[in-house]
Amino acid sequence: MNNYDDVERQYEAYTKKRKDMLYYKYIRSLIAVCSSNTEAILDVGSGGIDVLSHCSNIPYKVSLDMRYPVCGEDIEAIRQDFLEYEPERVFDIVCCFQVLEHIQDVEIFCRKLMRLSRNLVIVSVPYMWKEGRCKSHVQDPVDYDKLVGWFDCAPAFCNIVEERMVAVFLKDKNIRENLLEQNGREFADFDQHFLTASANAELKFECSEGERKIVLWGNGNCLARNLSKVLERCEVKYVCDNDPNKWGDVVGGLDIKCIPPQALVGLKNIFVIIMIDDSGIAIQVANQLLNMGIREYEYLHNWL
């Protein structure tokens, strides 16, 4: 076997391991929700991961990558540098997942993503990965403000799933601003629409995979309102909160006591679900988890 075959085999193993991640199921579901009345969609930097074939409602689907575009019966595969790609048409939706962190001239790249889209752009980036964690990343760490700077506008929707920030940018400024005002600048309605529709897409809550210990962060109204739905999906091991006044309180319906964040440090194979309505506070908790060295977590704001 030559070196090329060896590289190809390693890459196939890499993509096979990643394709069933909860993160990918999340973005496939998000695309499905956003793609009603969509005629054409472009996925930039596919990297061999198929996020398009499940959208049977979209007539024209293009996968573009310098090395590994996705081939399929109804997917056009294009092997080309995105900055050199000049299609004859614009796309209703342009996607770009886990690519921007690799791009040196990222603002130019983002402007082209927006230019090729008629309606919206969906992107994801590693959220607050430390510089040097991945050698090919030239933009780490990436936070919300950095992403906004690249696109020169705020996203219509933003969420964090498995250490990845997923954002939806709307082309129409008036629609974007109207949605912001209607939803208290948090896009709760958009989020709820996604979470409702995802039941008919392919998102599955897989927090029990690998016998993970489930932690609910936030012993407040959000938890109380949604606890019965949580218990339908998983067995909760811990409840955690930043408020010292809640430490030691027995959490109703669980018969377990609320613990401080420090108690999570050193625990193995945990899966934290942030049960906080305020997206700003939830983002702060996500940062706190990263600073605590807790990598195996999911954040879905108002996810039930």
Image (spheres, rainbow, N blue to C red):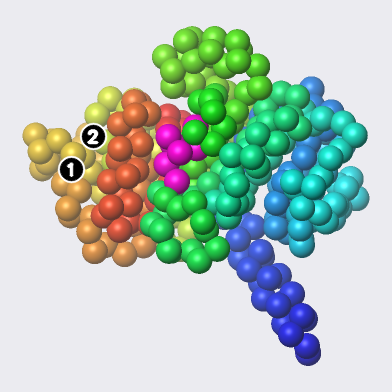
Residue type at mark 1: give it: Cys
For label 1, the residue is: 258
Q: Secondary structure at mark 2?
A: loop
Name above or below for residue 45 compared with residue 282. Answer: below
Q: Magenta segment range?
A: 142-148
Name above or below for residue 300 compared with residue 39. Answer: below
The answer to whether residue 43 is left or right of residue 217 is right
Q: Nearer the viewer, residue 228 or 101?
A: 101
Label 1 crowd bin: few (<14), some (14–19), many (20+), radius 10 Å: many
Q: Nearer the viewer, residue 252 or 141?
A: 141
The answer to whether residue 92 is left or right of residue 261 is right
Report how far apart the C-alphas of labels 2 and 1 lie in the structure: 7 Å
Q: Is residue 272 magenta?
A: no
Residue type at mark 2: give it: Asn
Name above or below for residue 135 compared with residue 10. Answer: above
User: Could you tell me if the residues under marks 2 and 1 are in contact, i.e. CB atoms within 8 Å?
Assistant: yes
In the image, what residue occupies the spot 30% across and 31% down?
281
Locate residue 91, reporting x and y percent.
Answer: 80, 31
- Residue 256: image quadrant is top left
Q: Secondary structure at mark 1?
A: strand
Locate residue 128, reporting x and y percent.
Answer: 40, 49
Number of numbered discs on residues: 2
- Residue 132: image quadrant is bottom left
For label 2, the residue is: 219
Locate residue 197, reporting x and y percent.
Answer: 62, 29
Locate residue 87, reporting x and y percent.
Answer: 86, 38
